[in-house]
Amino acid sequence: MKPISISYALARFVFLSCLTLALLTSVLVVSHVVTSFNRQQETVINREINSISKNFLLFLRHRQTLLREQARAPVMIQTLMQPESNIGKIQDFMADLSILGKKYPQSLLDFQGNILHATEDSHIVDFKQMPWLAGLLSGKSKQYTGVVTIKGQHYWCLAVPISYQQTIEGVLTALLPLHEIYPQAPPDTRFGGLAIEILADQQRLIHFGNQLSGHSHLISWPFSGLSLRFTVDDKAQNRQILILVVQLSLLIIFAIGLTTLLAYFYGYRYFVKPVFMVARATDELDKGEHYLKLKEEFRIKEFSDLFKKFNQMTTQVNLREIALKQSYEQLSKTIEELKQSESQLVQAEKMASLGTLAAGIAHEINNPVGYIKSNLDILQDYAQNLKDYYQAITASQVEEREKHALLAEKFDLDYILGDIAPLLQSSLSGIERVIAIVDSLKTFARTDQPQKSLCDINEGIKATITMAWNELKYHCRLHQEYGNLPKIPAYPGKLNQVFMNLLINAGQAIKDKGEIYIRTYTLNRDIVIEIRDTGRGIKPENIKQIFNPFYTSKPVGQGTGLGLSISQDIILQHSGRIEVSSHPGTGSCFSIYLPIPEDPKPEQATSCPAKTLF
């Protein structure tokens, strides 16, 4: 076998492949184009002729409707009931009748089909011979639309019955020139033209447009015994298909010849040889023993640039490995810094919440401190009275009992001794309330440890409620229902921040007065915390955005948009999830799911029965 060059083999391969592909493509494309063209043409033609047919029917329907309105005129009934006395009125009335501004020959027939009055004597028709008249007079037909011929001219005949108390008393007819149904010439189309004919018993009554040769479409009107025939010229279509096939064939032949020549003369020198060089150098690079340097000066710029970049790559492989190690170390540091930043961001959000609640907490502490001070002031006065009483007794004689009694009454000793105990008890209760508020503040604001610790979810919720109560108590009624929950390893401070964010959001969602429901329970292997409010709710299009950082529906300056985003991140850190359901106008419900470890500690949280607080 005689050997051949790569360029010759490439050129022959390209030629045969292109020729085969061209033949197959030509057959498929031409077949598809012709089929698509015919289908598109048929669709457009059907749409056009259906539109024209509907317009024709609409033309007749409008005029039929106007004729029916004329038939309802009282003078029509009066004339049919008393023709001799009302003939003058009907003549004057029908002389002024018009349909869409045009006057047409109209006739009024009595119940036997006789003409009582016709507007034009030259267009009088013997309607008694018409087969459709009996159907109108008997009430079987509501209207009639057809064609009549008068002196060789064709007219649309429209007829409607005239009834009185459900009895047909006569018929009103109108004759319209046949050509008025399509006064303009049909528009030219890309198919070369369109001709329209109206047929009666396969006989042409009128023709619109030029005489054309082509395929026809027939639409029947059963109600009138007429048909519409549309003829489309096929010459333009066949001419366009022939031009398309010739152009496509010439283009394919030219493309095959040019591709073959280019493959033969330039294939090897400018494509095959540099590819072989790159392949060889790549093999050497893959072995890793030594690198083959390519000649960078090449006529084709892309290959020249490729060779330069390849040489640069071979000299920088070791540098890239070193850079990769450094990048890995830097990435580890960046991840650690991100974790620290996240912790700082959570703490900053917590401090922002504490700042919001600071005024309320101060108010809560100030109230008990105020009445403790007042009680102690009163107690001080009481003590002074007791002192004075004691001094008075000391100065008197023991025998003067009546005087002692008068002194006791003077200083109101009995009331003072009875009031001292309640005052002290009230003061102690106030002090205990201050202690509880401070303990809750410490519980909420404590900084999380690096490691998780066993956490009582119910205790964290109660401490958070104490902190947030000043923001809620004026317009919210709080309902709490705590279930028996196991203690789970968690970051208590972070979870308290989540509870705080959800409670504050629930309170802000309630405009005037509303309810907030808190419920905890276990479901399968999860602890579930539900916080539901009866506020304004969330629009469906906004639910997917509420956990995005910096998204907020509050006015500028009143929210950071980080509360729910941080809350979701915290729950994800605990391998849990947050679900939300909301209906605008009825409220929202946030459900937190925290997984229970496979081997939870036996210690359980203190359970609380369902109750309503505050």
Image (cartoon, rainbow, N blue to C red):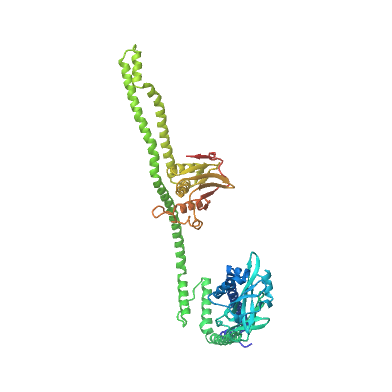
Snapshot quadrant of residue 43: bottom right
Residue farthest top in this picture: 399
Q: Nearer the viewer, residue 283 or 192?
A: 192
Eyeballing the image, is 555 above or below 112?
above
Question: Could you tell me which residue is drawn at 32 percent across and 16 percent down?
Answer: 394
Residue 269 visible in image: yes
Eyeballing the image, is 167 above or below 184?
above
> Is residue 347 left or right of 258 when viewed as pictured?
left
| Residue 325 in the image, given as x and y percentages of width and height | 46, 62
Residue farthest left in this picture: 395
Residue farthest front in this picture: 85
> Is residue 409 left or right of 302 when viewed as pictured?
left
| Residue 48 in the image, given as x and y percentages of width and height | 59, 77
Residue 13 visible in image: no
| Residue 283 in the image, given as x and y percentages of width and height | 53, 74
Q: Nearer the viewer, residue 345 or 138?
A: 138
Snapshot quadrant of residue 173: bottom right
Eyeballing the image, is 403 above or below 27?
above
Q: Nearer the viewer, residue 475 or 15?
A: 475
User: Which image quarter holds the N terminus?
Assistant: bottom right
Eyeballing the image, is 74 above or below 405?
below
> Is residue 438 left or right of 160 when viewed as pictured?
left
